[in-house]
Amino acid sequence: MRTNFKLPKVRNYKRSFIEIAYIGSPKRERVYNGSIIGLHIYPNRQKGTERLRQLEILRNELTTCMMKGWKPSDGKYERVQDNVLISVLNSVLLRIKQSYGRQHIDSLNLTLGRFKKFLTSKQMTVSALTLDHIRSFLDTFDSPSKYNRNRKHLSILLNKANIHLITPKSIPKLKERKEIPTPFTEDELITLLDWLKIEDYELYLCVKIMYFTLLRPHQEIRKLKILYITQTHISVPKGFTKNGKGRKIPINKELADELLSFTYNVPGTLNLWSQMPKHYDRNYFLQKWKRLKPIMLEKNIVKDNQKLYSVRHSAAVALYNKTQNLQLVSTVMDHSSIRITMDYLKTLNVHMDNLKIEDMPTL
């Protein structure tokens, strides 16, 4: 198709823009953000590679609009519902990136990536998307929890794009069968640690950190850098925790000595486990646990419904039984509310009605 404009160019200066030139004309037009084409793309609010990435997206979106006969001097581009679905969802994810935590964005990005692979046509328009497409996509997940998780993430992306197809009636959640986890007793935990110390020292340290700090293994423990560990504390910076807030947790001398010995002569800026700048994959400790689980079952070290995360459950139970302080448990568990902690402990069959005569008011 012949056009009367040259391919838009990225001009990355202190204030970056997309430059549009026209064939046979000295006229130049500058576009600084995506508002003129109805997209929330603001490169100049970003820095470094993220700015360049958004400039590239903006250039591609501008080119698409201009191929349809529009130009910036015409005013705001009137978007219709025939936009390419993937392009719309990509723009949505870019728009909400600053409003959500890193982990939430990663989860949304993962679901979007799966949805892209599922779609048979990469050029499917928004108006062509039906409930059958969404149902077929969600049916590819083999468990209710995965189904519901991806349903939730896809629903967020579609709703932000004003595509309101997923509702409680149109695509209801699947009922999840919640397996009641069995916490480790103190003796069971000692047996587990003694065995892991010989079989897999990294998993041994992970379990020990989880029990003594209640940090999450797949999110916070996995991403620990050596410099976050001192003789008295483990510090987790902002953005590494589930709620995005930083944490500082005291640790005992035995654990501190083991960790510092494990990382002796290794630069503090490196990851605790990989001992490289980059941390391991999210499932690193989970895969280690799964590999050893059949052996541990055979040796009666763990029960069938005891998982790696059961160590954290055990720590929560032990902390509550020791202190009877629900607020303290909620803070250490990094829960957003006490209600979550109460439900959590009830699931673990912890009784919170241990009221004694000594607890009653006196005069």
Image (cartoon, grey):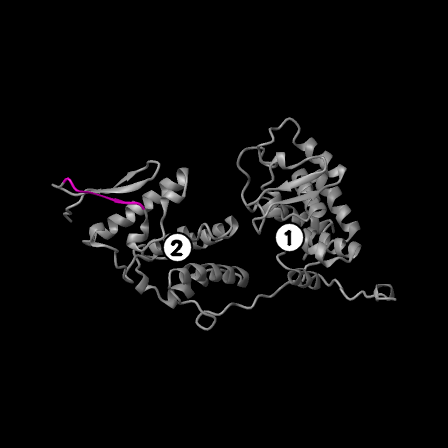
- Mark 1 or 2 closer to N-term? 2
- The residue at the far bottom in this view is 169
Q: Which mark is residue 92?
A: 2
Q: Which image quarter is the C terminus in?
A: bottom right
Kindly identify the residue that appears in the image at 67 percent across and 53 percent down: 331
Of residue 362 and residue 234, the one placed in the foreground of this image is: 362
- Disc 1, SS: loop
Q: Is residue 82 left or right of residue 356?
A: left
| Above or below 276: residue 239 | below
Query: Where residue 348 sits in the image (x, y, percent)?
Result: 71, 61
Identity, as a three-letter code, of the amino acid under mark 1: Asp
Q: Position of residue 238 (x, y in %)?
A: 57, 44
Residue in the image at 72% along x and 35% along y: 231
As helix, strand or loop, the secondary structure at mark 2 comes to: helix
Q: Is residue 335 left or right of residue 258?
A: left
Q: Is residue 253 positioned above or below 64 on the image? A: above
Residue 15 seen in this snapshot:
yes
- Residue range in magenta is 26-32
Q: Residue at x 39, y 68 (%)?
A: 131
Q: Is residue 30 magenta?
A: yes
